[in-house]
Image (spheres, rainbow, N blue to C red):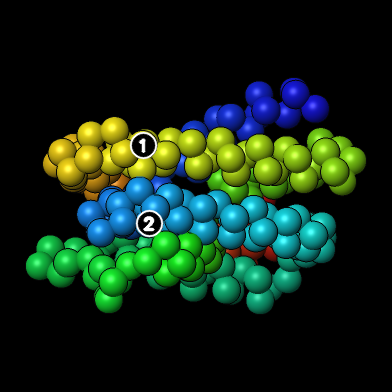
């Protein structure tokens, strides 16, 4: 069972680059309960990720069967999604628009729910997580072993984000400037990387659909 982590660790590194979760945790670190709220967001996100992973794994076999026997409508949908992705990637960003922050006083209970919501919203774009689930299923482990591996994956995913509540706990309000700078770097890097990834994904979907329509066989 330990061999599977040699495959999962590279996927995990890519998956853990989540600027949205990091930004919300930085926001929570600036509230009246910085440690509790930022920890609650991470806990809510991690628990939701684990639950969604189990749900996806249960339906992945049926999804795989459909992917192995695609129909024309699947490629039409893929073509439309690809065009949308390319459009989003090349859309001029509105720099004057600021990211909205949760309204009202943030409490640990609200933060827990907020973390889960952040996860649910981002699931359609969590391609590395789908890849990790696929590798776990391919390993043909016992059910309990598969759940343990998935739980370990999610725990390791959460570890880098623990830097926020730990830093706040150790140095208090002085952590705000440090976290702000880190968040700024993450946002700037993401602003360059994400459009490229979106454009590439959109291009592949469009080419895949066009190839199927012309030759009867897609790229994959």
Position of residue 93 measured from the top left corner of the image (x, y, whole percent): 19, 64
Foreground: 206 or 177? 177
In the image, taking residue 160 as reference, residue 123 lies left or right, namely right
In the image, taking residue 31 as reference, residue 79 lies left or right, namely right
Between the C-alphas of marks 2 and 1, the distance is 12 Å
Helix, strand or loop status at disc 1: helix
Instruction: Tell me the crowding category of disc 2: few under 14, some 14 to 19, or many 20 or more residues within 10 angstroms, Cα based.
Output: many
Tell me the tag on residue 34. Answer: none
Please name the residue shown 83% across and 38% down the image. Answer: 145
Position of residue 175 relative to residue 56, above or below, is: above
Asked where in the image residue 146 lies, by quadrant, the reply is top right
Helix, strand or loop status at disc 2: helix
Instruction: Tell me the crowding category of disc 1: few under 14, some 14 to 19, or many 20 or more residues within 10 angstroms, Cα based.
Output: some
In the image, taking residue 217 as reference, residue 59 lies left or right, namely right
Q: Which residue is mark 2?
A: 37
Position of residue 140 measured from the top left corner of the image (x, y, whole percent): 87, 39
Q: Which of pointers 2 and 1 lies earlier in the amino acid sequence?
A: 2
Foreground: 15 or 61? 15
Please name the residue shown 37% across and 62% down the image. Answer: 86
Position of residue 165 measured from the top left corner of the image (x, y, whole percent): 36, 43
- Visible residue check, residue 203: no
- Visible residue check, residue 93: yes
Position of residue 88 measured from the top left corner of the image (x, y, whole percent): 32, 66
Please name the residue shown 65% across and 60% down the image. Answer: 52
Quarter of the rendering occupied by the N terminus: top right
In the image, taking residue 96 as reference, residue 162 lies left or right, namely right
Please name the residue shown 64% across and 53% down the image. Answer: 50
Position of residue 142 relative to residue 34, above or below, is: above
Q: Which residue is mark 1?
A: 166
């Amino acid at each position: 069972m330990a061999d599977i982590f040699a495959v999962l660790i590279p996927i995990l590194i890519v998956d853990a680059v989540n600027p949205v979760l990091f930004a919300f945790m930085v926001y929570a670190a600036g509230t009246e309960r910085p440690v509790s709220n930022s920890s609650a967001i991470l806990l809510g996100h991690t628990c939701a990720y684990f639950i969604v992973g189990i749900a996806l794994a249960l339906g992945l076999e049926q999804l795989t069967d459909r992917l192995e026997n695609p129909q024309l409508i699947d490629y039409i949908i893929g073509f439309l999604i690809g065009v949308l992705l390319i459009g989003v990637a090349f859309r001029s960003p509105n720099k004057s628009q600021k990211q909205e922050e949760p309204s009202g006083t943030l409490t640990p209970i609200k933060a827990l729910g907020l973390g889960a919501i952040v996860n649910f919203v981002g699931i359609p774009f969590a391609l590395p997580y789908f890849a990790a689930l696929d590798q776990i299923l391919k390993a043909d482990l016992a059910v309990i072993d598969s759940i343990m591996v998935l739980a370990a994956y999610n725990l390791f995913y959460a570890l880098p984000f623990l830097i926020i509540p730990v830093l706040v706990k150790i140095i208090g309000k002085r952590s705000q400037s440090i976290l702000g700078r880190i968040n700024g770097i993450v946002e700037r890097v993401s602003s360059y990387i994400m459009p490229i990834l979106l454009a590439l994904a959109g291009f592949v979907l469009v080419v895949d659909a066009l190839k199927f329509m012309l030759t009867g066989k897609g790229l994959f």
